Image (cartoon, helix red, strand yellow):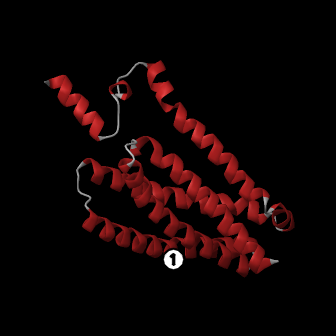
Amino acid sequence: IRAASDSEALAMAGLRRSEDLFAPVWEAARNRWPWLFVNLVTAFVATRVIGFFEGSIQQLVALATLMPIVASVGGNTGNQTIALVIRALALEQISPASLAHLLRKELTVGIVNGLLWGGFAGTLAGLLYGHVWLGAVMTAAVLLNLVIAATAGVVVPIALDRMGRDPAQGASVLLTFITDSMGFLLFLGLARLLLF
């Protein structure tokens, strides 16, 4: 009865018995390979986004030093949202009615934090590089990436859960791809539009 209960609890989280916290090292490592592969592929895709803007980066080297900030802040925001959503999934707190409320709330939090921290980062960037428009680009990119991160932080774990996958294993990989790629695209794209 205890073994069956344990298997059911793992299955509810999208896990197999072999993926338990105390599984042997080789088994645990092998179970993580698919997501590591996905992470490598998506990281290469993100680098291609940067490659589209090589000319802009060569004209204004500050872009290369600032773009990781946009991606990093987005990733952090999205991971905070993912943690809340995975916990809510585990506690069975998400219903179709609460999902709409949760998405609206997280989008609002993303906008508020994007305005505050995007403004802060943009002001610092503008002062550091003596370029007001660079600061404006930074502010806008952080704001937009935080909205995207909040959306992905809700949608990705719920979608994985509904597909029978473990959101705790895969959500952060997909979120990193989204926030990195979109952060680079937003920052470098806005820079190309407004600075050159």
What amino acid is at disc 1? Leu
Image-quadrant location for residue 180: bottom right
Residue in front for this viewpoint, 5 or 64? 5
Relative to 196, 27 lies left or right: left
Give x and y (percent) for residue 133.
72, 80
Question: In the depicted view, which residue is nearer to us: 98 or 56?
Answer: 98
In the displayed structure, 98 sits above or below 26; it is below
Q: Is residue 48 left or right of residue 114?
A: right
The image position of residue 10, as x and y in percent, is 28, 34
Residue located farthest toward the front when viewing the structure as drawn:
163
Q: Is residue 35 above or below residue 184?
A: above
Specify the farthest residue to the left: 1
Q: Is residue 153 left or right of residue 122?
A: left
Q: Residue at x 63, y 47 (%)?
A: 42
What is the total number of numbered labels drawn onto the structure image? 1
- For the question of whether residue 127 can be seen, the reply is no
Residue appearing at x 36%, y 73% in the figure: 104
Residue 183 versus residue 2: which sits nearer the camera?
Answer: 2
Residue displayed at 24% across by 35% down: 9
User: Residue 166: horizontal and vertical position, in percent?
Assistant: 39, 41
Instruction: Specify the quadrant that holds the C terminus.
Output: bottom right
| Looking at the image, residue 106 lies above or below residue 38 | below
Residue in front for this viewpoint, 65 or 7? 7
| Label 1, residues with CA under 10 Å away: few <14, some 14-19, many ≥20 | some
Secondary element at image label 1: helix
Residue at horizontal 44 percent and vertical 25 percent from the top: 28
Left or right of residue 118, residue 107 in this image: left
> Residue 74, how many percent across, how many down?
54, 61
Residue linked to disc 1: 115
On the question of residue 93 being in view, the answer is yes
